[in-house]
Amino acid sequence: MIYLDNSATTQPYKEVIDAFVKVSSTFFGNPSSLHGVGEKAEKLLQQARRQIAQLLKVKEKELLFTSGGTEGNNMAIKGIAKQYQHRGNHLITTTIEHPSVIETMKQLEKDGFEVTYLPVDGDGRISLDDLQVAIKEETILVSVMHVNNEIGTIQPIKAIGTLLKEYPKVFFHVDAVQSVGKVPLELYEFGIDACTMSSHKFHGLKGSGILYLRQGVSLTPLLAGGNQESELRSGTENTGGIVAMAKALRMTNDYFNSSSKLSHLMNEIRIALSEIEDVIIHTPIKETAPHILNFSVKGFKSEVFVHALEENDIYISTTSACSSKHAQASSTLLAMGIKEEIALSAVRVSLSYHTTADEVEKFIHEVKHTIFQLRKVMKA
């Protein structure tokens, strides 16, 4: 199997699974319990929080454990909006955010908030000028993803953070689900107030995530209950998943710090695809993540192409995994000005640090062969 859908989810490291099994079977106590079994689980939880804080270069008290990216985005955006609505009711985001951000904003609009959706250029990037124009007296939150999950475009997060320092009552939330371990993100230096991450995107397990919340920023909790996680996220902590997530983050950081392999392999794919007739590459060359490439093959529906490659045990995707089962053009590509006919044929390749040169070579060969065979069928 050649798995090239790592933006949807990654294969957990063996060591991560082993850690989860050991913690879940041996240290299964509730971390909130007063007895010894619970205390052992709490100690592991604190240790994992400390390790993650060191890796992210933040304070332990600034980390909240969640179930993943969707909860983290909802928690940050709704929590800040509700907590600070006495300051204003205006929120700013972009037209190409993940559904967990877009749909959250739509819900808040129904609750009386005003939302500005910033447009993007042909590379899928917002304009700082547009952002500055959009900010007004009632603005309390700007939410912009770091790396786009469909095309891999990197947004100018550091520049946005610098701009927002001129507006001290405006909070800055970043969805970093696709960038962790692939694109550097300095939470303090970039002026980020809240940041969302998800374990299964960096070879951890599904059901665990991180919300960084800068010290001094408060939230209105989404969930009422036992007041775990600094009284901001109630619910018994997933100790096994959190310990496994700490290990996954450490291992992924080790790969990131010692390898430029992703960029090299993706460049090989880009060069090969650019030489194929009727292939249109949507991912820009500059300021993009090293692991994502989005392209279209004129005349073929994306799902047809995906399933044709699957017959050769090669796995890629159409759009975001959250919307890939809906037969509609990518809203991200449409926002970039790409015609619907071309957007309907778009597919995404996403690599991991485990992707090999041999796998890339076979993928390129099968893409060429699949296009040739599909064209023969269409002409028959």
Image (cartoon, helix red, strand yellow):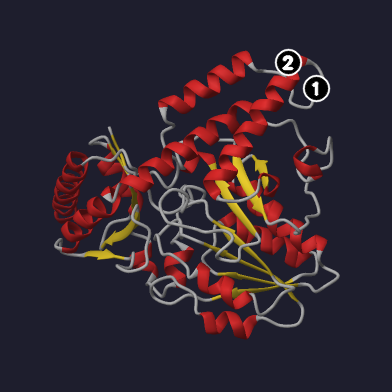
Image marks 1 and 2: residues in contact by CB distance under 8 Å: yes
Name the residue: 82% across, 21% down.
Answer: 34
Task: Residue type at mark 2: give it.
Answer: Val
Residue at horizontal 44 percent and vertical 25 percent from the top: 15
Would you name the residue on which mark 2 appears?
Answer: 37
Query: At 43% from the left edge and 44% from the top edge, which residue is drawn?
Result: 253
Q: Position of residue 272 (x, y in %)?
A: 16, 57
Circle 2 sits in a helix, a strand or a loop, which is it? helix
Say which residue appears at 82% left-offset and 73% top-offset. 87
Judge the density around disc 2: few (<14), some (14-19), many (≥20) Cα neighbours within 10 Å. some
The residue lying toward the viewer, choosing from 104 and 225, is 225
The front one of 316 and 361 is: 361
Q: CA distance from mark 1 to mark 2?
A: 8 Å
**Is 337 placed left or right of 228 in the picture?**
left
Give how far across and how far down residue 55 sits, in percent.
52, 45
Disc 1 residue type (three-letter): Ser
Q: Which mark identifies residue 33? A: 1
- Residue 47 placement (x, y as % from top left): 62, 32
Q: Quadrant of the N terminus?
A: top left
Q: Secondary structure at mark 1?
A: loop
- Where is residue 121, by image quadrant? bottom left
Q: Is residue 89 left or right of residue 288?
A: right
From the top left corner, tell me how far across and down residue 31 is, in percent: 74, 26
